[in-house]
Image: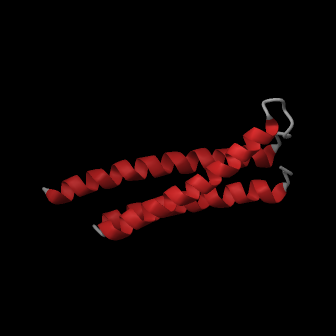
Amino acid sequence: MEIDESTVMELIIQAGEARSCSMEALRAARQQDWTRADAMLTEATQAAKAAHRIQTELIGADEGCGKIPVNLIMVHAQDHLMNAMLCRELAEEIIQLRRELAAC
Protein backbone atom coordinates (compact mmCIF):
# COMPACT_ATOMS: atom_id res chain seq x y z
CA MET A 1 0.00 0.00 0.00
CA GLU A 2 1.41 3.35 -0.98
CA ILE A 3 0.88 5.89 1.75
CA ASP A 4 0.47 9.41 0.53
CA GLU A 5 -1.19 12.55 1.80
CA SER A 6 -4.49 11.65 0.12
CA THR A 7 -4.75 8.44 2.18
CA VAL A 8 -4.30 10.35 5.41
CA MET A 9 -6.68 13.09 4.26
CA GLU A 10 -9.33 10.46 3.48
CA LEU A 11 -8.97 9.18 7.04
CA ILE A 12 -9.52 12.73 8.33
CA ILE A 13 -12.52 13.27 6.04
CA GLN A 14 -14.22 10.02 7.04
CA ALA A 15 -13.58 10.64 10.74
CA GLY A 16 -14.94 14.18 10.39
CA GLU A 17 -18.04 12.83 8.69
CA ALA A 18 -18.57 10.35 11.50
CA ARG A 19 -18.32 13.10 14.11
CA SER A 20 -20.62 15.44 12.16
CA CYS A 21 -23.25 12.74 11.74
CA SER A 22 -23.08 11.93 15.46
CA MET A 23 -23.67 15.57 16.34
CA GLU A 24 -26.55 15.76 13.87
CA ALA A 25 -28.04 12.67 15.52
CA LEU A 26 -27.91 14.47 18.86
CA ARG A 27 -29.65 17.52 17.38
CA ALA A 28 -32.36 15.27 15.94
CA ALA A 29 -32.83 13.58 19.31
CA ARG A 30 -33.25 16.96 20.97
CA GLN A 31 -36.24 17.44 18.64
CA GLN A 32 -37.40 13.88 19.39
CA ASP A 33 -36.94 12.99 15.73
CA TRP A 34 -35.94 9.41 16.47
CA THR A 35 -36.00 8.30 12.84
CA ARG A 36 -33.51 10.99 11.87
CA ALA A 37 -31.40 10.34 14.97
CA ASP A 38 -31.16 6.65 14.10
CA ALA A 39 -30.35 7.41 10.46
CA MET A 40 -27.59 9.79 11.43
CA LEU A 41 -26.11 7.28 13.88
CA THR A 42 -26.09 4.73 11.07
CA GLU A 43 -24.28 7.19 8.81
CA ALA A 44 -21.82 7.96 11.61
CA THR A 45 -21.12 4.26 12.01
CA GLN A 46 -20.53 3.80 8.29
CA ALA A 47 -18.12 6.74 8.12
CA ALA A 48 -16.28 5.54 11.24
CA LYS A 49 -15.92 2.08 9.72
CA ALA A 50 -14.51 3.59 6.52
CA ALA A 51 -12.00 5.60 8.57
CA HIS A 52 -11.13 2.55 10.64
CA ARG A 53 -10.47 0.51 7.48
CA ILE A 54 -7.94 3.14 6.38
CA GLN A 55 -6.34 3.09 9.82
CA THR A 56 -6.12 -0.71 9.69
CA GLU A 57 -4.46 -0.53 6.26
CA LEU A 58 -1.93 1.95 7.62
CA ILE A 59 -1.18 -0.26 10.61
CA GLY A 60 -0.81 -3.29 8.35
CA ALA A 61 1.51 -1.41 5.99
CA ASP A 62 3.64 -0.32 8.93
CA GLU A 63 4.00 -3.91 10.17
CA GLY A 64 4.98 -2.57 13.57
CA CYS A 65 8.38 -1.68 12.20
CA GLY A 66 8.11 2.06 11.69
CA LYS A 67 7.73 1.74 7.92
CA ILE A 68 5.10 4.50 7.92
CA PRO A 69 6.52 7.87 8.91
CA VAL A 70 4.72 9.43 11.83
CA ASN A 71 4.28 13.11 11.12
CA LEU A 72 1.96 15.80 12.39
CA ILE A 73 -0.77 15.09 9.80
CA MET A 74 -0.77 11.39 10.72
CA VAL A 75 -1.13 12.24 14.40
CA HIS A 76 -3.89 14.70 13.51
CA ALA A 77 -5.73 11.99 11.55
CA GLN A 78 -5.53 9.53 14.44
CA ASP A 79 -6.80 12.23 16.79
CA HIS A 80 -9.78 12.87 14.52
CA LEU A 81 -10.61 9.17 14.38
CA MET A 82 -10.47 8.63 18.11
CA ASN A 83 -12.59 11.72 18.77
CA ALA A 84 -15.13 10.61 16.18
CA MET A 85 -15.39 7.14 17.70
CA LEU A 86 -15.87 8.56 21.18
CA CYS A 87 -18.40 11.10 19.93
CA ARG A 88 -20.39 8.32 18.24
CA GLU A 89 -20.48 6.17 21.38
CA LEU A 90 -21.50 9.07 23.61
CA ALA A 91 -24.15 10.22 21.13
CA GLU A 92 -25.71 6.77 21.19
CA GLU A 93 -25.89 6.80 24.99
CA ILE A 94 -27.27 10.34 25.16
CA ILE A 95 -29.91 9.57 22.55
CA GLN A 96 -30.98 6.49 24.50
CA LEU A 97 -31.31 8.63 27.64
CA ARG A 98 -33.41 11.18 25.74
CA ARG A 99 -35.66 8.38 24.50
CA GLU A 100 -36.13 7.10 28.03
CA LEU A 101 -36.95 10.58 29.31
CA ALA A 102 -39.38 11.22 26.46
CA ALA A 103 -41.21 7.99 27.29
CA CYS A 104 -41.90 9.15 30.86
Residue 17 vs residue 92: left or right? right
Image-quadrant location for residue 38: bottom left
Foreground of the two, 83 or 40? 40
User: From where the camera sits, is residue 23 visible?
Assistant: no
**Relative to residue 23, is residue 85 depicted above or below?**
above
Residue at point 63%, 59% (across, down): 14
**Relative to residue 100, is residue 69 depicted above or below?**
above
Image-quadrant location for residue 41: bottom left
User: From where the camera sits, is residue 1 visible?
Assistant: yes
Residue at point 55%, 51% (across, down): 84
Residue 104 vs residue 75: left or right? left
Residue at point 72%, 59% (across, down): 10
Image-quadrant location for residue 104: bottom left
Residue 87: percent from the left, percent from the top? Answer: 49, 50
Query: Which residue is situated farthest in the top direction here?
Result: 65
Foreground of the two, 7 or 87? 7
**Relative to residue 53, is residue 25 depicted above or below?**
below
Residue 8: percent from the left, percent from the top? Answer: 76, 53
Residue 59: percent from the left, percent from the top? Answer: 74, 39
Q: How is the image coloured?
A: secondary structure
Foreground of the two, 94 or 5? 5
Residue 83 vs residue 5: left or right? left
Residue 13: percent from the left, percent from the top? Answer: 67, 61
